[in-house]
Amino acid sequence: MTGMILKRLLGALPNIVGVVIVTFILTRALPGDPAAYFAGPAATTEAIEQVRASLGLDKTMAHQFVLYLKDLARGNLGNSLTTGQPVVTEIRQRLPASLELTLCGLLIAVVVAVPLGVLAATRPGTWVDHLCRLLATAGVSLPTFFTGLLLAYVFYFLLGLAPSPLGRIDVSFSPPPAVTGLYLVDSLLARDLESFWASAKQLVLPALTMGLFVMAPLMRMTRASMLGVLSSEFIRTARASGLPRSQVLYAYAFRNALLPVVTTLGMVFSFLLGSNVLVEKVFAWPGIGSYVIEALVSSDYAPVQGFVLTMALLYVALNLAIDVLYVLIDPRVGIEG
Amino acid sequence: MSAATLKHIRYVATENPVTLVAFLLFSGFVLLALFGPWIAPYDPLASDSGAALKAPSAAHWFGTDSLGRDILSRIIVAARLDFGIAVSAVAASFVIGAALGSLAGFYGGWADRIIGRIADTIMAFPLFVLAMGIVAALGNTVANIVIATAIINLPFYIRVARAEVNVRRAAGYVEAARLAGNTDLRVLAMHVFPNILPPIMVQISLNMGWAILNAAGLSFIGLGVRPPQAEWGIMVAEGATYIISGEWWVALFPGAVLMLAVFTFNLLGDGLRDIMDPRMRT
């Protein structure tokens, strides 16, 4: 099995190489002359040439690519023009907020979508099934930024149940001491239940928004794969042998139906990481999504490039984790090699 | 279109009224996109500071925004831009993706490996993030939104075309066309390609909704379309500041129309799949 996992790790290498090449191309495809841009609007011709030399833009493309790789290896993504801080530092500070939001969104989606998918598959053609299908189609049609606004309007403005949709924790609380950077975990570690509730309340609406968006593909996949498994021969055999319905359903069918669902998680993460940017803007969530939008507005390119690279590497890593998980939960993979 | 196909279409429409509704909605949106500027009751750009942020009324069905512009008119006029972006992006990725995918599936070998690698590399990014990166790098214009949306849709067409061509490349009629003296490219273009169109049509319909969603998302975060131009995503963004103070109509109506447009395409895609897929005929 270790061999299998190693093989998957090696399989991710071409993707990482591809991602690095594409981000390099994106950094060099900036509109106009990057040297003139980084030198500022008032720069003289000599100053621009100086910047060009210091950025290595006067070298050949191949040479520039080597320099880019060296910078990446040293963890240097350049500095943000507006804050003057290294992009890596700022992304590292803000990443936990985005991760907390994304993971909670995923958790909500899985907890709701998988049981619903199973329910729809065990009662095909009934109103439960039709309702699930309608919800699934409606779910993928929802623009996340719009769902977020609607939820904020209903639960904050109309019902007053949710706190104002601004930030990760109410202003009257101070953030818990940073250990993981995830407020929910940190406040529990500090045994501070009040902060825990305060940050959980802020988190519910944005996480629900993300969850609603990815519920649809998860539910569809669970339903389809469960239907497929339920009509297979080993289930017929199990039923014919007189096993109780719940055992057939959960011990035999569900476990097998889970494998394609795990594969779908890859696509689900692509959706989540993308919609993360939109949801962070709606809820003023201080993650890397808001960071990149601020940078986009002020035409500050280094953070944008750092963000694209970070997200892509994160996504490759997540896909790798899914692959490894697949090897671990599918007993057949180890045997067939 | 033969009589049997027509009969089947009628069967699908009557069997699943949802498809019929989706088709009617789609026709409505196409009409808006074509004739929007003549249908809109007001000038979408004319501001009227006296009538700013008015709730929906008989004069302004969907209310007015912070500059007193009529929201209904802006939504109607925006249909052309939103559909234009989505249609051109999907058309570009269809043409390029289907061509690359067909070549990969037909010839296999190196062509297949290189084209497959291109598709994998695009898919290695979270797609919306890649689109943001492309627009940021190429410049903040509507044309670049189209290019970015086309690029992130490319892998889907490459994969469908590749898989469909691959199962057909050794089919009897392909052999026959070859033996009759047709060149490889001619066989691919005239004999194989028409047969892979149905599954690609379904892909196009499902993709259109997604393309609209992406384009609206990009303009929501301030990329591509610039104010004061009317576009559904940017209108939701403009309304976002007012929704938490209770002026719900500024963001709700454009958002709801955007959602309805995407929903229409998704339903239509499902319906088309029913028409194309003979296994669904019961």
Image (cartoon, coloured by chain):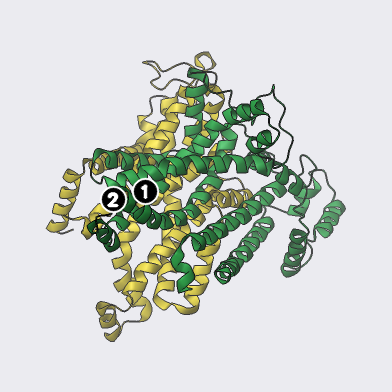
Chain colours: A green, B yellow
Quadrant for residue B13, please give it.
top left
The chain letter for the residue carrying disc 1 is A
B107 vs B219: above or below: below
What kind of residue is marked 1? Arg
A331 vs B63: above or below: below
What kind of residue is marked 2? Pro
Residue at horizontal 42%, vertical 64%? B159
The mark nearer the N terminus, 2 or 1, is 1
Q: Is residue B119 left or right of residue B16?
A: right
The answer to whether tags 2 and 1 share a subunit is yes
Q: Along the line of sight, which residue is nearer the eye, A183 or B115?
A: A183
Q: Which residue, as the protein is rendered here, is positioned at the far top?
A: B50
The chain letter for the residue carrying disc 2 is A
Residue A220 numbered tag: 1
Which quarter of the rendered picture does the N terminus of chain B lie within?
Answer: bottom left
Residue B269 numbered tag: none
Res B110 seen here: yes
Q: Is residue B252 left or right of residue B270?
A: right
Q: Residues within 10 Å of mark 2 (few under 14, many from 20)?
A: few
Classify mark 1: helix, strand or loop. Answer: helix
Q: Residues within 10 Å of mark 1 (few under 14, many from 20)?
A: many
Quadrant for residue B99, please give it.
bottom left
Res B231 seen here: no
Query: Whole-percent x and y of residue B9?
Result: 18, 51
Query: Whole-percent x and y of residue A283?
Result: 58, 31
Residue at horizontal 65%, vertical 52%? A310
Residue A244 numbered tag: 2
Q: Along the line of sight, which residue is nearer the eye, A271 or B255?
A: A271
Mark 2–mark 1 distance (CA, rounded to whole Å): 26 Å
Closer mark to the observer between disc 2 and disc 1: 2
Classify mark 2: helix, strand or loop. Answer: loop
